[in-house]
Amino acid sequence: MVSPFQNISESQKHKLFRLLGTHIFTFTKNQEILQTIKGENVICILLNGRASIVNIDYNGEETLVEELFENSVFGNSISTIASTDCQIRAVENTSVLVIDYNNLINISYIGYNYYNNFIINLFDIIHTKIREKNDRIKILTQKTIRDKLLEYFKAEYMKTRSKNIYLQLSLKELADYLAINRSAMFRELRYLKDENFIKIEGRRITLLYTPQV
């Protein structure tokens, strides 16, 4: 994914932060982030660390909605965080840059190249997020665990056209992301491995077939 600060130098980045009146918040592991930004019309960038957006149902069961890594962009307008059932939780010590949306869209800033680059990068990232959301909908609508896994592998393959898939999620987190039973997913992965569809080495999954695109 494109970095929001691509083609922006460190000195320009600091100028950009001052121009946009940004705020940086830090969170410790397992601390809830959403309380700081919920209800605000803001764009957030995860500067370092890692966080998860989860939905919690009436039984207390959690469903992983989105994983946030360094340079991930999120906010009320581009993420599923408006529901009262939703939480954003720091998985490790995490820093988040918060930008007021009204400060972000300001025609008087177009004279600054670093601002223009930043806006272009944001549009690229939002376009990618929309595509990934569509990919996930397609994955979740598959009827069997095998079909969900194969559709997930296909989506990952399409990003780089590489048969080597490096999971940013643990297998446990992957099961949560795909909304499937963990034990059943591990069993299906074992079947796919035994049938020479895939090879698994830690977090690297190698496809032994070419997905149909």
Image (cartoon, rainbow, N blue to C red):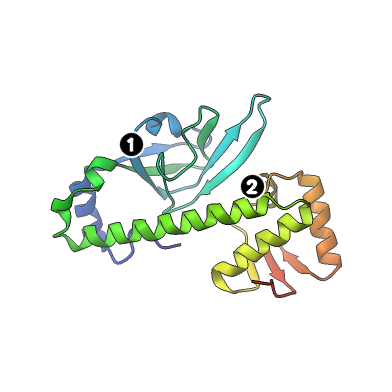
Q: Please state which amino acid type lies under the numbered disc 1.
A: Asn
Q: Is residue 47 left or right of residue 142?
A: left
**What number of labels is visible?**
2
- Give left or right: position of 68 versus 206: left
Q: Tag 2: residue type?
A: Tyr
Q: Tell me the residue at 43%/29% (across/down).
A: 35
Q: Which residue is mark 1?
A: 41
- In the image, residue 97 sits, relative to residue 86, either above or below, namely below
Whole-percent x, y for residue 121 in the image: 34, 60
State whether residue 57 appears in this view: yes
Residue 116: name its quadrant. Answer: bottom left
Q: At 33% from the left edge and 36% from the top edge, which residue is drawn?
A: 41
Q: Position of residue 15 (x, y in %)?
A: 19, 53
Residue ID for mark 2: 177
Residues at discs 2 and 1 in contact (Cβ within 8 Å): no
Q: Position of residue 21 (x, y in %)?
A: 21, 42
Secondary structure category for the residue under label 2: helix
Q: Residue at x 70, y 48 (%)?
A: 175
Circle 1 — which element? loop
Where residue 195 sits, quadrant-wise, is: bottom right
Near mark 2 (Cα within 10 A), the count class, few <14, some 14-19 or many ≥20, is some
Specify which label sits upstream in the sequence, 2 or 1: 1
> Is 146 displayed left or right of 204 in the figure?
right
Alpha-carbon span between mark 2 and mark 1 = 26 Å
Q: Quadrant of the C terminus?
A: bottom right
Across and down, in percent, residue 49 comes to 47, 48
Residue at position x 74%, y 74% from top? 209
- Closest to the observer, 162 or 30: 162
